[in-house]
Amino acid sequence: MCDAEIPIWNPGEIIHEGAEATVTEGKWFGKSAISKVRRKRGYRYPELDEKLTKKRIAAESRILFRLRKQSFPCPSIFYVNNNTSHIIMSKIIATPLYEQLNKLKSVESVLEKIGKIIRRLHLLNISHGDLTTHNILISPSENLFMIDFGLSKISPELEHLGLDLQVLSECLTASHAKLTNPMETIIRGYLSVEGGNEEVESARNVINRFEEIQGRVRYHG
């Protein structure tokens, strides 16, 4: 990891061009890789925008390093340049869950795996911040991976952990409405993962906060 000119990056096709970043696939020293360049936000003062962007790049790369050190299923960091808001990471051979979930025969098993992988993330004292089926990948053998940690937090508050589940719940309602009570199965998977310490909220506390958030959303909705 360095802040020099990018060495040996051969860009390929742009796979996502959103408001936050441009994501391109390509080759890094001959290995399949993904490049993510954060965009400047024109509505913010340039100094503030640069400060916030650098902060997010540093946080995302730090979280990915931390997760990979714990063998969490997510991309590996190859390169970071804070000055150009650029990250290059390994490419995971998998498909966004968004494209596959409604087609799976083993949907209940996968939903339970989703709950387990979320709990594994929370046990590492990290919240995702944008937990949708676009940011969970599924391999042909139905292994799951998480991507896009740009809004993640280390040592999150209980509210952030509950919000991970709420964001996912809203995504399932909007994009996978044919599934029957998917959150019940996800919660079952979440609660089945043991472990933790006094620095990490218990699984039951997180589920209670998620249910509280749901109640607030229904009341204000």
Image (cartoon, rainbow, N blue to C red):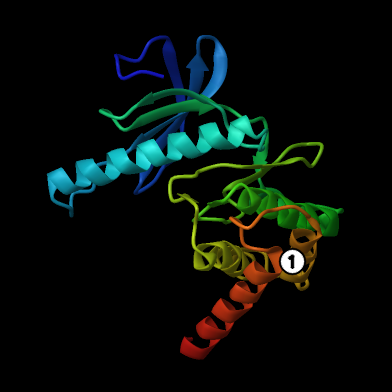
Residue 173: x, y in percent?
63, 71
> Relative to 190, does residue 89 appear above or below in the rendering?
above
Mark 1 residue crowding within 10 angstroms, few (<14) / some (14–19) / many (20+)? many
Question: SS at mark 1?
Answer: helix
Figure quadrant of the N terminus = top left
- Residue 208 or residue 43, whichever sits in front: 208
- Residue 136 or residue 203, whichever sits in front: 203
Residue drawn 76% across and 40% down? 143
> Relative to 79, does residue 145 appear above or below in the rendering?
below
Residue 24: x, y in percent?
45, 30
Residue drawn 57% across and 14% down? 31
Residue 182: x, y in percent?
74, 67
- Residue 150 or residue 172, whichever sits in front: 150
- Residue 5 or residue 116, whichever sits in front: 116
> Relative to 168, does residue 154 appear above or below in the rendering?
above
The quadrant in which residue 164 appears is bottom right
Considering every residue shown, the one lying at the far bottom of the view is: 219
Q: Amino acid at mark 1?
A: Ile
48 relative to 135 in the view: left or right: left
Residue 120: x, y in percent?
68, 49
Total number of numbered discs in the rendering: 1
- In the rendered image, which residue does mark 1 sit on? 187
12 relative to 47 in the view: left or right: right
75 relative to 144 in the view: left or right: left
